[in-house]
Image (spheres, rainbow, N blue to C red):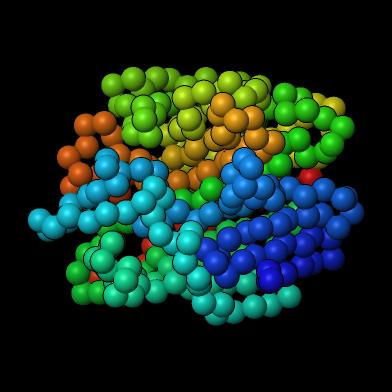
Amino acid sequence: MGITIETNHLKAVLDEKGAELTSLKRKDADIEYIWQADPKYWKRHAPVLFPIVGSLKANTYTYKGKSYHLPQHGFARDMVFELIDQKEDAVSFRLKSTEETKKMYPFDFELTIGYALGGDGLTVDYQVKNTADDEMYFSIGGHPAFNVPLEDSFEFTDYYVDPSPMKSRINLPLKEGLIDLEQRTLGQTNTTIALNHELFENDALIYETKGLNSFAIRNEQSKHSVTLSFKNFSYVGIWSTYPKESPFVCIEPWVGVADTLESTGELTGKLGIQKLAAQDTFHTKYAIVIK
């Protein structure tokens, strides 16, 4: 059973497994903005990606001369978090390292994820604390999936992604789940991106980001939209399934990214990896606004 938070006009539901957002609605409209995890297409709603984002070469990395194995996007999304605080309009969860996690990821950590409703949307807050006396390496990211279409009277192709600011960003293409740096290009995010399923033929669209960014899913024929905005994330992924034509699109803010084709597997040299000093805390957040 989910944990519900609400305001006068918004309602969200969270799950202790993965500290995952499973529903986000406006009370004045019968619209579900979050994908409802139909396993026919994709079994998740909005998983948290930690302690890696994307795939490792052969699901393996090395640290201090020892090899470890991690699945795509890490383990946090499949673990049960502790509920540490709950208010009417906000909730927080925490995941701590254990002997089992250290078999996959040899660091002591506390991952705290907070959700707070306000205005027209939801703020998602990430805090990663290094609880050891040695440095720690990690990545973290969001993977929220939004229903497209938002209303039954429309089609997937009636929608588009609206980037802000409208400027070109470096596009990092994937090849068999890994970043192909040699093929990186200047992505055309200086205009809107019309949605069609073939857009995801080569997996996610991945862009480098700096500063304040927002990516909205809109439809010229409807007043309803969803916007995800962030400041301190290095990358964003835009994804849906292909060739299976799924009725959702993910907008994914990431601090970190998949291994490159040239990756040596050494964690400390991984593209986008974050280094956190002993007993230090990393903090970032993103917001979802629904109209």
Image coordinates of residue 52 in percent, x first then y, are 36, 52
Residue at 40% over, 65% down: 128
Image coordinates of residue 127 in percent, x first then y, are 45, 65
The answer to whether 161 is drawn above or below residue 129 in the figure is above
Whether residue 47 is visible here, answered yes or no, is yes
Residue at 33% over, 20% down: 183
Assign the C terminus to one quadrant of the image: top right
Residue lying at the far left of the rendered structure = 65
Residue lying at the far front of the rendered structure = 40
Left or right of 63, for residue 125: right
Whether residue 279 is visible here, answered yes or no, is no
Left or right of 1, for residue 143: left
Residue at 65% over, 65% down: 14
Image coordinates of residue 264 in percent, x first then y, are 17, 40
- Between residue 165 and residue 273, name the one nearer to us: 273
Image coordinates of residue 194 in percent, x first then y, are 66, 22
The answer to whether 106 is drawn above or below residue 237 in the figure is below
Left or right of 243, for residue 288: right
Residue lying at the far right of the rendered structure = 28
- Between residue 215 and residue 31, name the one nearer to us: 31
- Between residue 182 and residue 156, name the one nearer to us: 156
The answer to whether 258 is drawn above or below residue 15 in the figure is above
Assign the N terminus to one quadrant of the image: bottom right
Residue at 13% over, 57% down: 66
- Between residue 127 and residue 67, name the one nearer to us: 67
Q: How many marks?
A: 0
